[in-house]
């Protein structure tokens, strides 16, 4: 049986860009555009009414911006399965870490190739984080090192540190490797276990830490102080 198409919501204040995305997405047999929003508030409402699976969300929009809208989606239990991919004007965007903290599953530059955009939708819909190893090791660590990380003595860091205590030794080990930008296959090779075993550890760590997906695990690993930012 053919699975139902991925339901995609487009949120961008530029109508021309939304039209281009619609043509691209609707050309794929495994996905369809179920709505368009010109601002964040409309995106949140449509995510609910259109039963979207993935929202392509522009960070900068008038009124309710993409960051606020993503926080609203992440905080709504009824939208727990909705995945948000943030669209940025530049590959290195000062709001990227904020987007991940807000609950986004990843980010994509507006200058990305069509195949990259379509692949991003499929990755997000599958529950994975749209964070390449290069992005995790470079961009995320860079922003955190430049002040993006929370105060190590602050309440947020303390909260995450307390949650880390619930992890097993192996789950903490896997979390460190996830934060280092390693894939499940790479982690499995390092730990001499199966990729399925790694996936199980990742899922358990997500549940214990209250992370929506792999992207959130990366942020938590840095904010808790488990992994220290390093700029190479």
Image (cartoon, grey):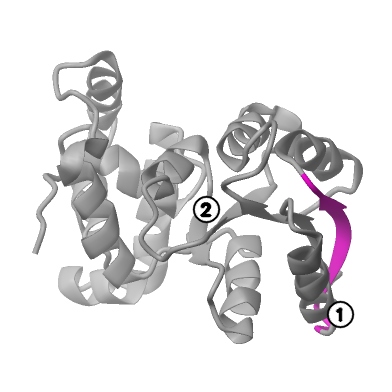
Q: Quadrant of residue 34?
A: bottom right
Q: Which residue matches tag 1?
A: 2
Does the stretch in magenta take in 33?
Answer: yes
In 3D space, how far apart are the residues under numbered discs 1 and 2 (Cα atoms)? 25 Å
Image location of residue 42, percent across then percent down: 81, 38
Q: Residue at x 46, y 38 (%)?
A: 207
Q: Residue at x 50, y 67 (%)?
A: 109
Quadrant, the C terminus: bottom left
Single out the mark in the foreground, 1 or 2: 2
Q: Residue at x 61, y 42 (%)?
A: 66
Q: Is residue 143 visible?
A: yes
Depth check: 206 or 84 in front? Answer: 84
Say the numbered circle drawn on residue 110: none
Q: Secondary structure at mark 1?
A: loop
Q: Earlier in the sequence, mark 1 or mark 2?
A: 1
Q: Secondary structure at mark 2?
A: loop
Circle 1 Cα neighbour tier, 10 Å, few/some/many (<14 / 14–19 / ≥20): few
Image location of residue 3, percent across then percent down: 83, 73
Q: Is residue 205 rendered to the left or right of residue 35?
A: left
Q: Quadrant of residue 191?
A: bottom left
Q: Which residue matches tag 2?
A: 105
Q: Which residues are magenta?
A: 28-38
Does the stretch in magenta take in 124?
Answer: no
Majority secondary structure of magenta residues: strand
Q: Is residue 168 visible?
A: no
Q: Is residue 179 rendered to the left or right of residue 80?
A: left
Image location of residue 190, percent across then percent down: 17, 72
């Amino acid at each position: 049986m053919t699975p139902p198409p991925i339901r995609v919501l487009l949120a961008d204040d530029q109508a021309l860009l939304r039209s281009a995305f619609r043509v691209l997405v609707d050309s794929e047999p495994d996905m369809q555009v179920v709505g368009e929003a010109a601002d964040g508030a409309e995106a949140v409402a449509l995510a609910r009414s259109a039963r979207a699976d993935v929202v392509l969300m522009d960070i900068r929009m008038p009124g309710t911006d993409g960051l606020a809208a993503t926080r609203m989606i992440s905080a709504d239990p009824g939208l727990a399965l909705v995945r948000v991919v943030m669209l940025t004007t530049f590959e290195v965007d000062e709001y990227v870490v904020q987007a991940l903290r807000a609950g986004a599953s990843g980010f994509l530059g507006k200058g990305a190739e069509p195949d990259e955009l379509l692949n991003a939708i499929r990755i997000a819909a599958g529950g994975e984080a749209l964070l390449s190893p290069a992005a995790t090791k470079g961009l995320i660590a860079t922003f955190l090192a430049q002040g993006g990380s929370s105060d190590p003595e602050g309440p947020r860091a303390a909260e995450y540190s307390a949650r880390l205590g619930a992890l097993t030794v192996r789950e903490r080990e896997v979390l460190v490797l996830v934060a280092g930008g390693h894939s499940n296959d790479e982690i499995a090779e390092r730990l001499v276990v199966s990729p399925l075993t790694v996936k199980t550890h990742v899922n358990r760590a997500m549940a214990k830490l209250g992370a929506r997906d792999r992207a959130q695990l990366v942020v938590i690993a840095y904010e808790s102080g488990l992994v220290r930012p390093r700029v190479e």
